[in-house]
Image (cartoon, rainbow, N blue to C red):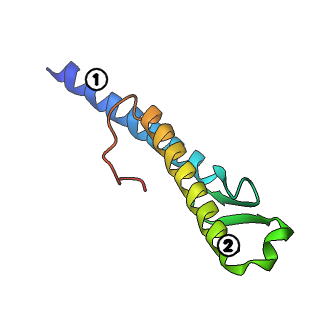
Amino acid sequence: MKAQLGNLMQQAQKLQQNMQQAQAELADLEATGEAGGGMVKVTITGQHEAKQVQIDPSLLDDLEMLEDLVAAAINDAAHRIKDASQEKLSKAAGGLPIPPGLFG
């Protein structure tokens, strides 16, 4: 019984170490979202901070379209970060399910 408990504790520690390493790697993660066929690109970090915005100059004449495309590109990048985060954390958890919303 003690051997099983000790084994369980070792597994829990390993899981915790894996999760901490995965979270540290997520901070360095970057994703680029695109909209308008690549006319607007936004790069964000794993901490959801904007790093770079690229806008095709032809969009400068249509402010409303530009605003919509920037918002769409940000949302695309945020979804990419979320998907990559969930994948990395799931791998770190060794296949154990991660509750929805736990990490973003």
Residue 42 visible to the viewer: yes
Count of residue discs: 2
Q: Which amino acid does label 1 sit on?
A: Asn
**Disc 2 secondary structure class:** helix
Q: Which of marks 1 and 2 is in front?
A: 2
Percent position of residue 20, x then y? 48, 45
Q: Which of marks 1 and 2 is nearer the N terminus?
A: 1
Q: Distance between the residues labelled 1 and 2?
A: 58 Å
* Residue name at image x 67 percent, y 73 percent: 65
Closest to the observer, 62 or 18: 62
* Residue name at image x 63 percent, y 49 percent: 29
Q: Mark 2 points at which residue?
A: 65
* Residue name at image x 74 percent, y 77 percent: 62
In this image, 84 relative to 54: left or right? left
Percent position of residue 6, x then y? 26, 26
Please tell me in which quadrant of the rendered image residue 10 appears: top left
Q: What residue type is labelled 2?
A: Met
Closest to the observer, 92 or 75: 75
Closest to the observer, 8 or 24: 24
